[in-house]
Image (spheres, rainbow, N blue to C red):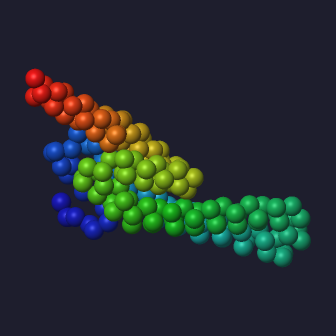
Amino acid sequence: MTQVGFFTSEEIPPWLPPQAKEARSHVFWAQIISFVEIPVAILLSILMFYYYFKYSSRPYIVTNPSAAGFATDFLAFAIYFILIVFVCALELAFTKAHISNAIDSGKYLLAQERSLLWGVLSIVFGLIPGILLIAASTRLGELGKQSTPQPFQAATSTAQEKAGETHQTQKP
């Protein structure tokens, strides 16, 4: 399979734990769906601009005075679809660098934070990729809870106690 620079690879590294593999799969499908959403949102924004200009023209408003309200709604939807294109393009560009590479390098908590951030942003502008990225974040959160290291202070106090025990056993 040809690898595109900004897409997450479909091939999952074998050393990843099952939760990380599933999260990486969610990220991959979120990117694919974002890629599909871009042309759809472009076409819908063009269509909304067409209807905006059609219903806001002077001859149409003279014959139908309530058309001005429709025209502003079409303009709002056109702007929203342009924002969807922008967010999906950013998601395509940064998801591999921010999330997939962090998962591959074992930085699960960092990948969880970033997938949650992109998920919330994407749920507002492109529903399905946002849901998939939030699902990836929850899977990475489960993995992060399993591999949470012990606090440094607790580790040093146990080491000091063991050192004290060996020191006391050497005196008699």
Q: As displayed, is residue 60 above or below residue 10? A: below
Total labels: the figure holds 0
Q: As displayed, is residue 13 above or below residue 45? A: above
Q: Nearer the viewer, residue 110 or 164?
A: 164
The picture places residue 140, in percent across and down from the top left corner, at 35, 42
**64 relative to 148 in the view: left or right:** right
The picture places residue 172, in percent across and down from the top left corner, at 10, 23
The picture places residue 124, in percent across and down from the top left corner, at 57, 52
Name the residue located 21 percent from the left edge and 31 percent from the top edge: 164
Name the residue located 65 percent from the left edge and 70 percent from the top edge: 49
The picture places residue 169, in percent across and down from the top left corner, at 13, 25
Q: Is residue 159 visible?
A: yes
Name the residue located 17 percent from the left edge and 27 percent from the top edge: 168
Name the residue located 10 percent from the left edge and 28 percent from the top edge: 170
**18 relative to 97 in the view: left or right:** left
Q: Residue furthest bottom?
A: 58
User: Could you tell me which quadrant the N terminus lies in?
Assistant: bottom left
Q: Nearer the viewer, residue 19 or 93?
A: 19
Q: Is residue 18 visible?
A: no
Q: Residue furthest top?
A: 172
Q: Nearer the viewer, residue 62 or 138?
A: 138
Q: Nearer the viewer, residue 62 or 75?
A: 75
Q: Residue furthest front?
A: 172
Q: Quadrant of residue 53?
A: bottom right
Q: As displayed, is residue 169 above or below residue 152? A: above
Q: Quadrant of residue 72?
A: bottom right
